[in-house]
Image (spheres, coloured by chain):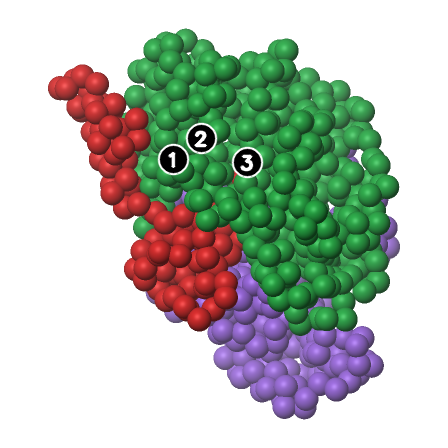
Amino acid sequence: MKYIDEFNDPELARRLLDEIRATATRPWALMEVCGGQTHSIIRHGIDQLLPEQVELIHGPGCPVCVTPLEVIDKALEIAARPGVIFCSFGDMLRVPGTGRDLFRVKGEGGDVRVVYSPLDALELARRHPDREVVFFAIGFETTAPANAMAVHQARRLGLSNFSLLVSHVRVPPAVEAIMTAPACRVQGFLAAGHVCSVMGTAEYPELAERFGVPMVVTGFEPLDILEGIRRAVRQLERGEHRVENAYPRAVREEGNPAAVRMIEEVFEVTDRSWRGIGPIPASGWRLRDAFRAYDAEHRFDVTGIRTEEPAECRSGEVLQGLIKPTECAAFGTTCTPRTPLGATMVSSEGACAAYYLYRRMSAPTPQAGRATHEGVAPVA
Amino acid sequence: MCLAVPGKVVAIDDSADPLTGLIDFGGVQKQACLEYVPEVRVGEYVIVHVGFALQRLDEESALASLKLFEELGLLEEEFGDAWEQAAKEAGTA
Amino acid sequence: MPEQLAEVVDPANWTCPAPLRDQGVVVMGHGGGGALSAELMEQVFTPAYGNATLAGLADSAVLELGGTRLAFSTDSYVVRPLFFPGGSLGDLAVNGTVNDLAMSGARPAYLSAAFVLEEGVELTVVERIARAMGAAAGTAGVTIATGDTKVVESGHGDGVYVTTAGVGLVPDGVDIRPQRARPGDAVIVSGPIGLHGVAIMSVREGLEFGVEIASDTAPLADLVAAMLAVTSDIHVLRDPTRGGLAASLNEIARASGTGVRLQERAIPVPDAVANACGFLGLDPLYVANEGRLVAFVPPAEAEQVLAAMRAHPQGAGATLIGECVADHPGMVVVATGLGGTRVVDLPLGEQLPRIC
């Protein structure tokens, strides 16, 4: 596949790794903000190939992971109602709310459906005028144009049985929150390429300047990620902190103005809570008043649902790179991939879930000297 | 954030509202909304997320990136700061 | 040795054996061939039935009966849609059970077929499925010897469900089961993976996409016979259906207390499967197959077994994809194309399209 295969070339990856190795003279901690990049890093084992000096902190860039418990509980409440078709991206179905998840609601008779696109949910609303179709509109800036278009079309088509449960989040305020945390260890960012495909890069120079961190717009294939790391390390070694675009084939400085216009027509900036982190000012989007009729929270009157995050879960600190998963008392005991307490254990790419797997892998075996498998990061 | 993959536009339905096209992902074909890339032409590549083309892919930039990777370690010795030079050529620095 | 090893280090114990998930209701994942299916088996069925034969966890049970060794297996088929590129429910119902028998090294002989029909289903649909079953049985060389039909009220079924059971004889000297995997064994897959799962997804409501892929549904008993003609000492066979190659290899690793190490670049993934998985956010290792097997073979026999497989139409794409190792018992690890490593865990339930 063009634009994928070329950016997976092992020989070029080796050159990039050599270059990173030659460039890094000191330890540097970089955060890849985006869950898709974390996925790619783990999928290809990139973290194990990097020189010791370069540490990757997996950031809070998985919309599934950061959707707050309270919103999940609202989703569960709505999805369980008779007459509702509740539509969601597949990865939201197994995220636990309080005591249950969407799978269980489905098992108990709720009409929960996985869709590929919000337009598929809109089509369901058109085909089932007697049912209330609710779409779980989660995501970062990348997904916002799609969800905005669904609402825009619903209004245009006069589909009054369609609504969104919105939990949209924005990257720049999260970066700001991470950098202002007292024990922040992050020295440079790999900015999320597809967020920038939509939004452009205009929001980043101010952040790079204020916090003195390089911000490198980075793609998702192995060579893209290595190039992002290489440029960030290079800047750090030189004492620079600029915005660079290491994903120019898909990111233009101005982003996609048509998509941004649609977002702004439908959504407005609001404060939002992030699962495990807490409230971050201006870090989300909600439907504008003009689209209030399409807001599922109001239509189904679930605004009163209030849920606290489990106190023993320290995923917020893990997400910010403040502690390693193993430093959390719940890790591997009350919190496992089967019974996750927090976001980072829910997603298979979450830092806690990844640690959990590797911990199992390096469990001691009877053969002496094999306790740690070659090529796998040892676990404290 | 956000699984988005490159695909080739193989057909555009001008009459569809929103604007829709058929995208080929290496032998796998799926409809996508083209409303955000209205200037795209058949044969061009776009990056697709949840059924929406978010951006056209720029072939020149892609080739420039690959050329840069190929020259890593080689040009460094000959020309010094080659990566930055190449990045400038790609219009990214 | 590996059995003892498994006792010393039971990787599952690291987590403390989870209680049956506090769900309290059946969820789709219980039928997904992953961890939830295994739990249902271990915590509900095995204790309730209370016998050692069931604990084998192989695709089919091997029973001593009247001086012969009989392989016995049953499976229910609930695919939607009923007809898909490359086959139908009928093909799966025959080939699936034939293959479960073949994974014990048996020569399948007789099948039963029980239909659950939903009131209102067109008879032509039932007929098409029955004809497909007859044709598949002919191809596989088995006889459908007995059957049953029940009808449920409209709305209480999904059109047509079929349950088949089958028996076959296991040749002398053949002992194929997951517990027999040994460090050093070559891990061989019989052909390209992921075709069935992607073919089904391409026609599933809400997900439809265009792809020129047909299900790989096929009977594998003849291929297994060709492999056994090379050596009777094949350690493990498995047909990686639900949960894909990842689920099968994890089950083998856990049952035998060994580890599995795969070379990612060696795994035959057709481009269209890779690209379909790419845009849906799925991993081809977890996608279902219906006409493939994975074999654990002693290293000394691997070359000859591979050659015999490649000479057979169902094994033309046979490939060595990795080896069984003593390290990381109970776990499956992939060496990535870039030279890194990643763990391929047992899927929890069904794989779902993701956006992240």
| Chain letter for the green colouring in the rendering | A
Q: Which chain carries label 2?
A: A
Q: What kind of residue is marked 2? A: Ala
In the picture of the structure, the residue carrying the numbered disc 1 is A253
Q: Which chain carries label 1?
A: A
Is label 2 in a helix, a strand or a loop?
A: loop
Q: Do the residues labelled 1 and 2 touch (CB within 8 Å)?
A: yes
Q: Position of residue C222 (x, y in %)?
A: 48, 70
At 47% from the left and 69% from the top, the residue drawn is B16
Of circles 3 and 2, the one toward us is 2
| Mark 2 nearby-residue class (10 Å; few <14, some 14–19, many ≥20) | few
Is label 1 in a helix, a strand or a loop?
A: loop
Q: What shade does chain B have?
A: red
In the picture of the structure, the residue carrying the numbered disc 3 is A35
Measure how far apart labels 3 and 2 are at the Cα level.
22 Å
Label disc, if present, on residue A202 of the rendered structure: 2
| Residue closest to the far front | A290
In the image, taking residue A215 as reference, residue A69 lies left or right, namely right
In the image, taking residue C230 as reference, residue A153 lies left or right, namely right
Q: Tell me which numbered mark, 1 or 2, is placed earlier along the sequence.
A: 2
